Image (cartoon, rainbow, N blue to C red):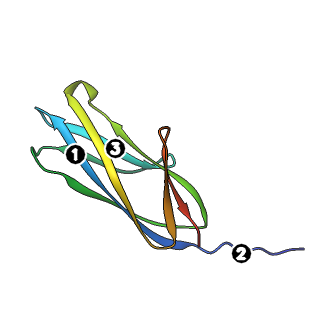
Amino acid sequence: MLNISMNNYFVKVTCDVTCKCDKPLRYRAFVNEELFTERTWIWSDVYLEEMFQISAPPGRYTIRFENVDPELGIIKVRNFRVDGPGRMLENKKDTTLEITG
């Protein structure tokens, strides 16, 4: 019987989040379907760095942001950066972290 062990690798993903809104707006950030954070945006004319610390085996992990209050404004997420054994795969449909190991 073949015994294959998957090693976890630590990867840090950072991105810039901006918001255009007049009132506090909530957003959520997910990796695959796991909720990583929910925040309330209360600032104006600034951007925040959102950071994900992920320990996982090699593979692909979708990173998704959800605007909880879309009637209050919009959020923009850009400039993904990876620290660790991985890279970002971005297209119009989704944003994916690939952990390469």
**Mark 3 — residue?**
28
Residue 14 position, x and y percent, is 34, 61
* Residue that label 1 marks: 18
| Residue 37 relative to residue 72: left or right | right
Residue type marked 3: Arg
Instruction: Give whichever of 56, 90 is nearer the camera.
Output: 90
- In the rendered image, residue 58, in percent from the top left (x then y), is placed at 61, 66
Q: CA distance from mark 2 to mark 1?
A: 40 Å
Question: What amino acid type should be assigned to the residue bearing mark 1?
Answer: Thr
Mark 3 residue element: strand
What residue appears at the point 13 percent right and 50 percent down from the top-left corner? 46
Q: Is residue 34 above or below residue 2?
A: above
Tell which circle, 2 or 1, labels the residue nearer the N-terminal end. 2
Residue 44: give x, y in percent of width and height: 9, 43
Residue type marked 2: Ser
Instruction: Tell me how far mark 3 sits from mark 2, CA to CA.
Output: 33 Å
Circle 1 crowding by C-alpha within 10 Å: few under 14, some 14–19, many from 20: some
Quadrant assignment for the N terminus: bottom right
Report the Cα–Cα distance between label 1 and label 3.
Answer: 13 Å
Q: Position of residue 28 (x, y in %)?
A: 34, 43
Element assignment for label 1: strand
Q: Is residue 24 left or right of residue 74?
A: left
Q: Residues within 10 Å of mark 3 (few under 14, many from 20)?
A: some
The residue shown at (81%, 75%) is 3
Which residue does the numbered mark 2 point to in the structure image?
Answer: 5
**Upstream in the sequence, badge 1 or badge 3?**
1
Residue 82 got which mark?
A: none
The mark nearer the N terminus, 3 or 2, is: 2
Instruction: Report the residue at 18% width, 51% height from top.
Output: 47
Q: Mark 3 and 2 residues: CB-CB less than 8 Å, in contact?
A: no
